[in-house]
Amino acid sequence: MEKFVINGPTVLHGDVTIAGAKNVALKAIVTSLLTDDEIILHNMPHIRDVLLMLDVVKSLGAHVTIEGNTIRIQDGHTKDTIVPLEIGARLRTSSMVLGPMLSRYGNATIPNPGGCRIGARPIDRHIEGLKRMGATIDYDSKDGYFHAHAQHLHGAQISFLKNTHTGTETLILGAVLADGTTVLKNAAEEVEIDDLIALLTAMGANITRSGNREITIVGVPKLHGAQYTIMSDRNEEATFAIAALTTKGDITVHHSQRHNMKAFLEAFEKAGGVYKMIDDTTTEYFYDKPIQPVDIVTGSHPGFMTDWQAPWALLMTQATGVSTIHETVFENRFLYVEELRKMGANISYFDPNVEHPEAFYNFNWEDRIKGTHQGISITGPTKLHNAILSMNDLRAGATVVLAAMLAIGQSSIYGVEQIDRGYEQIDTRLAALGASIEWIEEDEIV
């Protein structure tokens, strides 16, 4: 069993380089299944989810070489179209291989994907879109697999009922080699999708953002290899910015994505934080005055990202007054609240007054779990104390790590594999900023 042992409180100072974006890296790996040529990907983060996705493409015959933060992938063209259960079920985005496999080989068999426990995150939007493009896809509850077949995928006009980041990318990956033109309406606008589009374009794909929340893909007969450097991770940058402000320190971020973080930076300044633009890709974040309460409503791009709200909640425990967070993207993303309460945080749940919630929320309203809430109210400032904590999902993991650095005393945090899914060497990078953090492996008691 692995855990972090953290001694607080700590003031963080120094420089940090932001790693490659997890939400691009996983999809970039999948593009290797669209061509027999080699794909060379730079700025790839050393995180658990990247290794898991590499296992997925290797299970389909791809050859992989890792050289530092560069990954070379070449499809072995074995036509093995089954992703083993023990590999695919560990990662939600493993379902994204469906489009490439159907386009090139006409078959794909994938297990029901896994991932963070932050909501139902159904892949029905992906499945229905691929069916509109000519695929036959059935789920067998007996073996836990989706069984997909297609004579050949063809273009279609598809309108998403809800904003879906992964669904948009899945159908782009399916459409690039399909016959004819595919138009995605109400398509997600996240910049990570644009980065994936840029990679596919470098491989020879024909993709344009043809209108407001609209993407047009004209299928091509063949794609070729490419070299590409993926963007840095704006979620990681937001985490370090909050770390600087909560600990009353200052952190200079290299490979900054601030031009893609408008909603976050507006809230950061309202809270009293300061950021200084050193150059185009370098930003300094620091504490200057008492932290102020800010009410947040999460939303799709260009709104305040759902991935930012958990660390933001920690920041608000240090604000003078009452702040609120209204989560609209997922139906179960406040699992970290009980961990912060263990440390003395004053946080309560509430149900926002929303007319027609089935239309307002981005998740399927009927999927919500009885007893969960979409809003929290945070009263501060609060002196946090040490505790035995656990990580329930990736961003919650980052939140409790920051909380432990802020708290008085020594905290132990279990579930290290959650934060390792998306933050590269987070312990050593925080230690370099002055944190007292140690990654310990314990012998499990049988």
Image (tube, rainbow, N blue to C red):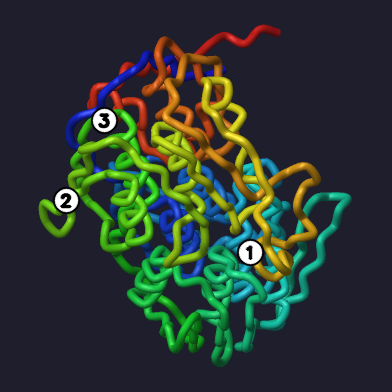
Quadrant containing the C terminus in the rendered view: top right
Tag 3 or tag 2, which sits nearer the N-term?
Answer: 3
Q: Residue at x 53, y 44 (%)?
A: 52
Numbered circle sitting on residue 248: 3
Tag 2 or tag 1, which sits nearer the N-term?
Answer: 2
Amino acid carrying mark 1 in the image: Asn
Q: Is residue 211 above or below residue 173?
A: below
Left/right placement of residue 273 relative to residue 219 reads left
Under circle 3, the secondary element is loop
Amino acid carrying mark 3 in the image: Lys
Identify which residue, 76 or 139, lies in the foreground.
139
Left/right placement of residue 187 relative to residue 318 reads right
Identify which residue, 258 or 123, lies in the foreground.
258
Q: Disc 2 marks which residue?
A: 282
Q: Disc 1 marks which residue?
A: 362
Identify which residue, 21 or 140, lies in the foreground.
21
Given this view, does label 1 or label 2 mark the residue nearer the observer? 1
Q: Position of residue 108 (x, y in %)?
A: 68, 64
Q: Position of residue 17 (x, y in %)?
A: 23, 42
Under circle 1, the secondary element is loop
